[in-house]
Image (cartoon, rainbow, N blue to C red):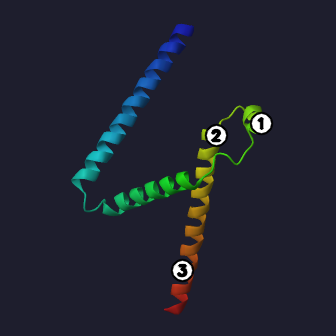
Amino acid sequence: MDIFINIGMIVMYLLLAAGLLALLFFSIKVTISNIGNSKVTLIALVAFGVIFLLSYLISDSQDVSLALFEKTATDPGLSKMIGTGLIIFYFMLIAAVGSTIYAAISKMLK
């Protein structure tokens, strides 16, 4: 009975991989064929990449003692990625609140 479960899991992983590859292929194909319509999406992706890079460079991996790293079985690299995620979250939160306030104020002034 275990052999059928193993074969089923292997088939499931193969189908998942095929679906993900098809998704990537066709999304890249449509983006390249419609580059004029995809310009805003590409700008947003590049902007998010820049935000990620800046957040990674700003975040600190030495803000926690080494004893805590040993206690939680983590390392400074994971601490740096957690800091990066937090900085991205704060930046996106400030951007969302700022754009909401800007939209409300511009709507009142019209």
Q: Is residue 2 above or below residue 57?
A: above
Q: Is residue 108 above or below residue 67?
A: below
Element at badge 3? Answer: helix
| Left or right, 13 with reference to 32 | right
Q: Is residue 98 above or below residue 64?
A: below
Q: Is residue 14 above or below residue 90?
A: above
Q: Nearer the viewer, residue 47 or 63?
A: 63
Q: Which residue is mark 1?
A: 67
Numbered disc in front, either 2 or 3: 2
How crowded pointer 3 is (Cα within 10 Å; few <14, some 14-19, many 20+) is rated as: few
Outermost residue, left side: 33
Q: Amino acid at mark 2?
A: Pro
Quarter of the view holding residue 17? top left
Element at badge 2? Answer: helix
The residue at 52%/92% (across/down) is 109
> Residue 62 appears at what percent x and percent y?
67, 46
The residue at 53%/74% (across/down) is 99
Q: Which residue is mark 2?
A: 76
> Residue 59 appears at what percent x and percent y?
60, 52
Q: Amino acid at mark 1?
A: Ala
Q: Which residue is mark 3?
A: 102
Numbered disc in front, either 1 or 3: 1
The residue at 76%/38% (across/down) is 68
Q: Which of pointers 1 and 3 lies earlier in the amino acid sequence?
A: 1
Quarter of the view holding residue 91? bottom right
